[in-house]
Image (tube, helix red, strand yellow):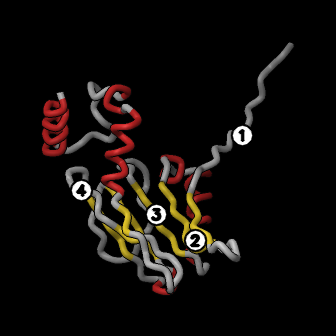
């Protein structure tokens, strides 16, 4: 008899590191959160531990959360309930960090990627980058807009989405 045994499936999550050329030292980590990072379990626990390690180091952190589902990362202070968040945590300013919150109808805010003190910080227009990616990858043809998004949108947001879909033909 042949059986199948349960195997632990580990999904490797990608991220970007900005490194100092001469020393290879990590200057900035850029994380784009995945569902595994935000849903309770091993993926969430693993990411929170990694996040804490980065925040306890001299490495800057840029955390991009473009998911409406799952548990939002922890921030202290009076933080409104945004759909999406961008966190820019400069090591020298901790525990303070810049939080850019935005909702589905908003343009993604521009943000600067922190580098070493003597280096100019590039300003990232993530909204423009995602628009280019959407067009070049052909997502308009690959995605089905006939199903409601999860989690459900508010009535105002749903009307807004439907107007965009109709205007695109």
Q: Residue furthest top?
A: 1
Q: Please tell me how crowded label 4 is: few (under 14), some (14-19), or many (20+) other residues with Cα within 10 Å.
A: few
Mark 2 residue crowding within 10 angstroms, few (<14) / some (14–19) / many (20+):
few
Earlier-in-chain disc, 2 versus 4: 2
Q: Read off the residue under disc 1.
A: 8
Helix, strand or loop at disc 4? Answer: loop
The residue singled out by tag 4 in the image is 107
Foreground disc of the pair 3, 4: 4
Instruction: Please tell me which residue is depicted at 59% across the width and 81% down the height of the picture.
Output: 58
Frontmost of labels 4 and 1 is 4
The image shows residue 97 at horizontal and vertical percentages of 41, 78
Q: Is residue 95 left or right of residue 145?
A: right
> Mark 3 falls on what kind of element?
strand
Q: Is disc 3 in contact with disc 2, using a CB cutoff of under 8 Å? A: no
Q: CA distance from mark 2 to mark 4?
A: 29 Å
Residue 116 x %, y %: 53, 81
Residue drawn at 56 percent across, 56 percent down: 15
| Mark found first going from the N terminus, 2 or 1 | 1
* Mark 3 Cα shell of 10 Å, populated few (<14), some (14-19), many (≥20): many
Q: Does any portion of residue 53 appear in the rendered image?
A: no
Query: Which quarter shows the N terminus?
Result: top right
Residue 63: assigned label: 3
For marks 1 and 3 on the same chain, the one whose residue lies earlier in the sequence: 1
User: In this rendering, would 133 be left or right of 109?
Assistant: right
């Amino acid at each position: 008899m042949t059986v199948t045994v349960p195997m632990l499936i580990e999904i490797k999550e990608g991220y970007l590191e900005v490194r100092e050329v001469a020393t290879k030292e990590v200057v900035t980590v850029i994380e784009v959160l995945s569902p595994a990072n935000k849903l309770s379990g091993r993926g969430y626990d693993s990411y929170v531990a990694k996040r804490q390690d980065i925040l306890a180091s001299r490495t800057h952190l840029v955390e991009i959360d473009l998911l409406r589902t799952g548990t939002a990362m922890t921030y202290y202070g009076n933080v409104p309930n945004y759909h999406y968040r961008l966190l820019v945590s400069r090591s020298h300013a901790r525990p303070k960090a810049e939080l850019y919150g935005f909702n589905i109808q908003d343009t993604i805010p521009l943000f600067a990627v922190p580098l070493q003190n003597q280096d100019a910080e590039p300003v990232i227009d993530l909204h423009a980058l995602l628009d280019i990616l959407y067009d070049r990858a052909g997502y308009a043809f690959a995605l089905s807009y006939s199903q409601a998004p999860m989690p459900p949108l508010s009535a105002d947001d749903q009307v807004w989405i439907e107007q965009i879909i109709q205007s695109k033909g």
